[in-house]
Amino acid sequence: MGRKEDNIAKAMALIENPERIRNIGIAAHIDHGKTTLSDNLIAGAGMMSEELAGKQLMLDFDEQEQARGITINAATASMVHVFNGDDYLINLIDTPGHVDFGGDVTRAMRAVDGAIVVVDSVEGVMPQTETVIRQALKERVKPVLFINKVDRLINELKLNAEEMQKRFMKIITDVNRLLMKYSAEEFKQAWQVNVQEGRVAFGSAFNNWAISVPAMERTKVSFKQIVDYVRAGKQKELAKMAPLHQIILNMVIRHLPNPRQAQAYRIQQIWKGDLNSDIGKSMQTCDHTGKVAMMITKIIIDPHAGEIAVGRIFSGTIRKGSELYVYGGGSTKYKIQLLSMMVGPDRIPVDEIAAGNIAAVVGLKGAIAGSTVSSLSDMDPFEPMVHYSDPVVTLAIEAKHTQDLPKLIEVLRNVSKADPSIQIDINQETGEHLISGMGELHLEVTMYRIKNDYKVEVQTSEPLVVYRETVDRTGGPFEGKSPNKHNRFYFKVEPLEEAVIQLIKDNTLPQGTKFKDKKTIIDLLQKAGFSREEARGIEAVEGFNVLTDVTKGIQYLDETFELLIEAFNEVVTKGPLANERVYGIKASLVDAKLHEDSIHRGPAQVIPAGRNSIYGAMCQANRVLMEPIQRVYINVPIEIMGSVTNEIQQRRGVVVEMNQDGDDMVVIATVPVAGMFGFASAIRSATGGKVLWSSENEGYQRVPTELQRDVVAKIRERKGLKPEPYDANYYAQL
């Protein structure tokens, strides 16, 4: 029996023992060495050959990932590690660091209880490091720190042991500052990464060695010796004395929680049902005899097995052949056809998997990433995952050959199932489909998959920017009449308070029309600037927009309100300026006149009347187009600074700050996404390739007034509309 088979047998023996399980993620800025680290951990645990580790990139098994040298999907692998004479099962999820794939990080964090934060010792804490730490702490995932690429400090920066330790202290302080800033109150102190306790390791994932303070005491290896070994080119010997997987996995087992400990404090954060119910207690204690509760964090489309749902089991035991409900627009029952554990690209079939594990399931047809799966038909679903950025770039895509159209629609549905950060709009009338993603790279990778994995030939447009519409003052009340003139609605529209937008961002104010704890929500809205009437009348939250009813005693309104919510949703999806989504408006119904006969106030009457009333009020409130912007971080030698600032200004960018770091300047700028197309090649040629840069989505800003008219006209023409948007008079006459 080889080491791998032996380990698989051991893993099977541990899946029912939560004390001996650790579910962990690896999170970091792009190129800080996450995938190389995961490979070497898997190799050390005997799951692949040690020579290939770090070169094979086992978890980057997608061709695209190997070609680009970055991680796109969050891959999962299970391995067994011996600590103090006991076997432990470690389920590891490697996550992407590139900002375009941040959605995958959020989903992976839901499945794990602990994270190894990897920081490059030369670059230090970068913007994306902050984002991934924030995502981990929001999901109550406990961090430990691995400072990677230490050999670069010694060989490239020629630092000695003292200078090196100073560098380490700065990184540790920066990470602890972020933990203080984003941790929940009860963990601010407890989760600080402490060198003495061994919550920080230093090393080189590529060269397969690592060290921590407790390990130094055990192995008698000092920082000075490390410097000598690395300078002498003896990193192989170092890897024998202090093997990476041993040091890191010991740190994981000692300092990161097992599923039972973690679920005790994580469930209340990720599930808002009744904690004293049977399923609530079962999840908090990670009880494998309870009812099944599982959260799907990823869908993999496999050419042979079809859709595989990967997720974390929080309660109960899933058995092959059993039937489970999938929640998402109602609940449907599905039969489990295959059940397996994931080891990199391999799936090891098992007959049952208990709470506390990460499982791969075939048979849950209706599941998407974020679905709740349970053996109960009426379980409260898990909290939806909050993604830190919306899609900002769109491609129009159509099939090259007409006969491929039905196949393309099917493929697009599969793509958006496997990656919920991709938004698909299918337009049956024009045959043109819009696919929106987090950035140019995100869409490039998705297009590659459509062409190569699904074998559909497609044509795409130039990338387009996703705009938003809003208003900058109060408009209305505006009268909207139904086509039969028997019903009239009067809406007022104004900008939504910033504090309320923040509540929606934090998911404190949930999407939709069902508010469980309405009293708390009313209090929160009043604190955020709503009047008492507005807060009590809240009816719907759609995106970053709120609908509220401030009318008094209008007959038949209750029966009609569902239809007004539909009208509001239509407005929010297609604004009156350029048919783009609406952002940050508060629409209040202030009066209504309704026909007493329900036959005269059906959907065909009420929806257009409500829609025209809100559109008209928005016209009076001065419509504003907003464009997405990115925050760009550029690291460049001082002498070629000028060409960088020039490049930013040509793209309507604004330099926010400049800091000197040694001989380099770090430039931070905000640039409209519309100006970012082709930025990568332009900045390389402008600086002769001497530049490091990264970007993250920063939200929306107003399109400059002098450009708005042209931009609106272009968007409208592209959508087949007349270039000039309608004014309020048009909606008054309808």
Image (cartoon, rainbow, N blue to C red):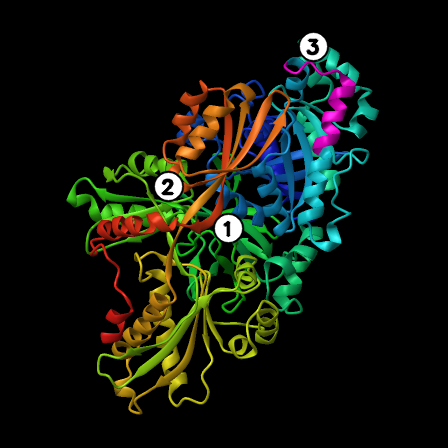
Mark 1 or mark 3: whose residue is earlier in sequence: 3
* Mark 3 vs 2: CB contact within 8 A: no
Three-letter code, disc 3: Arg
Three-letter code, disc 1: His
Q: Nearer the viewer, mark 2 or mark 1?
A: 2
Decide: few, some or many residues near mark 2? Use Cα within 10 Å; few <14, some 14-19, many ≥20.
some
Q: Nearer the viewer, mark 3 or mark 2?
A: 2
Q: Is residue 734 visible?
A: no
Q: Which residue is mark 1?
A: 387
Q: Main secondary structure of the magenta part?
A: helix
Disc 2 element = helix
Q: Is residue 273 above or below residue 461?
A: below
Q: Is residue 600 above or below residue 92?
A: below
Looking at the picture, tell me which residue is in the foreground, 217 or 638.
638
Q: CA distance from mark 1 to mark 3?
A: 44 Å
What residue appears at the point 54 percent right and 75 percent down from the top-left corner?
Answer: 535
Disc 3 element = helix
Q: Which residue is mark 2?
A: 674
What residue appears at the point 63 percent right and 56 percent down from the top-left corner?
Answer: 288
Mark 3 or mark 2: whose residue is earlier in sequence: 3
Q: Position of residue 606 (x, y in %)?
A: 30, 78
Residue extending farthest left = 402
Q: Quadrant of the C terminus?
A: bottom left
Disc number placed over residue 231 in the picture, else none: 3
* Mark 1 vs 3: CB contact within 8 A: no
Looking at the picture, tell me which residue is in the foreground, 316 or 536.
536
What residue appears at the point 75 percent right and 20 percent down from the top-left corner?
Answer: 163
Q: Is residue 209 above or below residue 324?
A: above
Q: Position of residue 463 (x, y in %)?
A: 32, 40
Q: CA distance from mark 3 to mark 2?
A: 47 Å
Residue extending farthest top = 232
Q: Relative to 600, is 555 on the left or the right?
A: right
